Amino acid sequence: MPAAKPVSDSAASARRLSTLLEVSQALSGTLNLKSAIQRVLGTLIRHHSVVRGMVTLLRDGELHVEAVEGFDDRARSTRIKVGEGITGQVVESGKPIVVPRVSREPGFMNMGLRRSDHLRQELSFICVPIVLNRIAVGTLGVDLRFKPERDYDNSQKFFGIVSSMIAQALNVQRLVEEERRRLLDENTHLRQELRERYDFSNIIGTSGPTRQMYEQVAQVAQTNTTVLIRGESGTGKELIAHAIHYNSLRVKKPFVKVSCAALPDTLIESELFGYEKGAFTGAVARKKGRFEMAEGGTLFLDEIGDVNLGTQVKLLRVLQEREFERVGGTETVKVNVRLIAATNKDMEKAIAEGAFREDLYYRLNVFTIFVPPLRERKADLLLLADHFLEKFSREHNKVIKRISTPAIDMLTAYHWPGNVRELENALERAVLVCDSAVIHGHHLPPSLQTADSSGTVTRVSLKDAVVAYERDLIQDALKTTRGNRAKAARLLDTTERILNYKVRSYAIDARRFRVSEGARRRSRADADGQADGYMA
Ligand SMILES: Nc1ncnc2c1ncn2[C@@H]1O[C@H](COP(=O)(O)OP(=O)(O)OP(=O)(O)O)[C@@H](O)[C@H]1O
Ligand SMILES: [Mg+2]
């Protein structure tokens, strides 16, 4: 039948295309390459008269069996040397080898692994290399039922395509693996860096209050106690929270921070406790909250004083029972998290005003660390200044050796309302504007400039200052009384005689403040009119 050949041809190509589709789905469906390749071999056996197949990959100079189908299990542990047997030759040369009749091939490695039923039928063997970046990194070998009419060229091309698809998947897997390893390395490195950064040695200060603080941190770090850190803004509360975590037994677990003040009331609960799918519009999937993210580690609730009363109730429950429910969920989640909270608020006042729950406060206030303001630990100030000078010189690539004595005086005279953070910023600014090897007074920010250092001292005698002040007061009183001296004297609690004397001696022109009779009448009429209008 003349039409038969094209029909069977197109049926064969349709079968091949559908196999390739299945192969590509198997390879792209998972990141577990081994099981994907196993599935590819299964597909080939089902659709392509493949009796059995084997994929090998080069590792440490030898071919390791990655997946087999149709061999018994011993085949999985087989190792093939490069250049050994047909498979070894394929990877060595990077070229495919086709053996139409296996029984006639003396060099064919039997490996003693064939199943007896296969021995009875004649087989063909096709082995194609798996090529990655132009280098053969493995092989795909298949045994096919021998058919004298088989187009070996075509078959070899087909298996070549399958092998290049495996190569692509291998490439993706290697990239992912590389990226994963890079991230792991980076993570280890960052953790190490964090540990170093939050080491005690990086909390600068030797003053009495600072030493006391170190002792408290050391005492509490190794326990699971809830810690409340109190102190003004910029005193180093967050630094201490980190130091506690990185010196605790939870060091290998996460440190998770929540800035309570930065989160609007509507978001804070879902941020802390997570939410279930469908809890609210936009909740398309379940999301873990910060409590769950911190599992095994430490949760740092910064600015706890700003949490709303509703959330305070839920926090109280977590602190008491170590469990909570996600927003929109009923499942109770248990957590093992150590809590550190910080605030610069006056908590006692907040409790008195009803803005903070007393019971939550007592739960948090188990171990409180007070961080003193910088102005109360002047001994630390110069150490900190030197520390920041060195840090910022390094960061901005500048060689600055010291801080001049007048600049040191300015630093110590200042009251530092913004505490260590303000000092840090002042030093960074000084390093940036400094054009020599020494920080001078004029490199410091304007808020630190005293009248003395900036040459803006006003030279005025006490007598002149009093005269100026007195003249101002009298002029002001006359203005109020519209030039009426008797009224002005009463306003200033003095006599008219004294006022007249002063007006004359200071040459104040009292008439300037008088309002003409006409103007006065007009203004009174205006006022009456307004009052009438108001009454109406
Ligand atoms: N003793 C210290 N040694 C070195 N650096 C410090 C010290 N105390 C604070 N700092 C630095 O000062 C800056 C402010 O500290 P931190 O953020 O911990 O303050 P905070 O008390 O949390 O402030 P806020 O209440 O405003 O959040 C940080 O850059 C920190 O590294
Ligand atoms: Mg802070």
Image: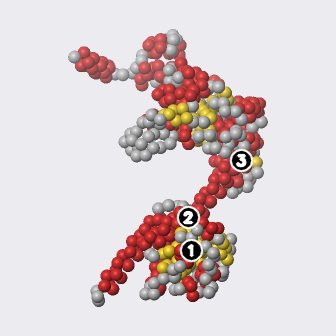
- The part of the image, by quadrant, that contains residue 170 is bottom right
Q: Position of residue 501 (x, y in %)?
A: 53, 16
**Residue ID at (65%, 57%):** 185
Residue extending farthest bottom: 2
Cβ at disc 2 under 8 Å from ligand 1: no
Q: Position of residue 240 (x, y in %)?
A: 67, 37
| Residue annotated with mark 1 | 116
Amino acid of disc 2: Lys
**Residue ID at (48%, 75%):** 50
Badge 1 or badge 2: first in the primary sequence? 2
Q: Position of residue 197 (x, y in %)?
A: 69, 46
SS category of the residue bearing label 1: helix
Residue 350: tell me if it is visible: no
- The part of the image, by quadrant, that contains residue 441 is top right
Amino acid of disc 1: Ser
| Residue annotated with mark 3 | 196
Q: Nearer the viewer, residue 68 or 497?
A: 68
Tag nearer the camera, 1 or 3: 1
Badge 2 or badge 3: first in the primary sequence? 2
Give the position of the N terminus as an image quadrant.
Answer: bottom left
Q: Looking at the picture, does residue 465 appear above or below residue 74?
A: above
| Residue annotated with mark 2 | 34
Tag nearer the camera, 1 or 2: 1
Badge 1 or badge 3: first in the primary sequence? 1
Q: Within 10 angstroms of label 2, few (less than 14), some, or many (20 or more) residues? A: some
Q: Nearer the viewer, residue 22 or 456?
A: 22
Alpha carbon separation for disc pair 2 and 3: 40 Å
